[in-house]
Image: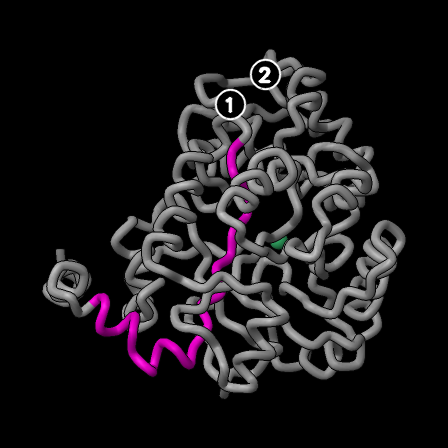
Amino acid sequence: MGILKSIKRGVVAAGKSSGTFRLIADSGWRQSRLLILGYHGVSLEDEHEWNGALYMSPAKFRSRMEAIQRHGCAVLPLQEALELLRLRHLPPRSVALTFDDGTYDFYKTVCPILKEYGYPATVYLTTYWMTLQLPVVPGTWSYMLWKGRNSVIDASSLLDQAVTFDLRTPDGRSRALRQMRAWAESQDLAGEQCDAMSRQLADLLGLDYQEFRSKRIIQLLRPEEVKAVASPSVSVQLHTHHHRTAKDREGYLRELQENRRQINGILGSNPTHFCYPSGNHKPEHIPWLREAGVVSATTCVPGIVSASTNPLQLPRLIDTSFLSDVQFEGWLAGFGALLPHLVRLRAA
Ligand SMILES: [Zn+2]
């Protein structure tokens, strides 16, 4: 371990044990700031073993909610938190919870836990795969390739060319995924055609596609489930229709408009809060977001929000399976933000 790293570890450990934790958590500095936490999925089965950056086990997620309660954090709806921040009236240790994409587990697992703790949340819903009601690609391909991690398969029928997938190493699985994505892109495949590839891949790997599909792993909420989760404490907001960052203004606005139209069609609401898909944000997006009537936008840049933060570039702590309890609690107190390099982050 490098000297700098060991000093920083020491700071976190000492901070927790010596009362510095409380000192910072109770400071005026922390009280004038909002910590926005970002989550993706909570596993229905073994998804966190496949991708611990995207998925967390239900036990781990519950322990996070428990820590938030134990440290006396005020969990606020995002919109209210941003208003109180502007008015400089945030309660001590303010936190807002956000969930990206709107996967089925939000309905199945997350909502019941949030209800238990009485915590409000924002779901950033991407809508294309919701309308298809199919397992999302390429996540599903990556998951299946991991499921078949002991095998070497002839994938010629899948990619219409002589090719072998050696899935016994992470490198081999990445290569296979890259080849599948490149093929789908070169053929300009629509969602249903990508799903046909998922089915074919499952067959090649000896996986039961119907069973996988019925489990709802790596699938989005269905419209009726969006309706069921939406409430005064669960706000459904924007994340683009295709989970895509268009390069030009027209394309960017189209993604937002279609996403909003879909959500409005289900809830009759007019969502104005946004999360950048894959955390991709550039200065030129800001006027486009304003034009679309977006009032806040969250990134995957680790940090804590202050009154001077641009509301269209809000930093968030993306919480993952890789973040230790001590690091997480450091962020709740406020000093995690001082040590952002401790966090292993992957935008998603
Ligand atoms: Zn996303």
The location of residue 291, given as percent across then percent down, is 79, 81
- Which amino acid type is marked by label 2? Leu
> Relative to 309, does residue 192 appear above or below in the rendering?
above
* Magenta residue span: 21-43
Determine the secondary structure under disc 2.
helix
Mark 2 is surrounded, within 10 Å at the Cα level, by few (under 14), some (14 to 19) or many (20 or more) other residues, namely many
Instruction: Give the quarter of the image for residue 84.
Output: bottom right
The disc at residue 147 is 1
Which residue lies at the image location 61% right of the left edge and 76% below the top edge?
282
Q: How many marks on residues?
A: 2
Residue at position x 68%, y 38% from top?
A: 137
Residue 215: image location, x then y, percent = 65, 23
Give the mark nearest the N terminus, 1 or 2: 1
Residue 205: image tag: 2
Q: Position of residue 8 (x, y in %)?
A: 17, 65
> Tags 1 and 2 in contact by the CB under 8 Å rule?
yes
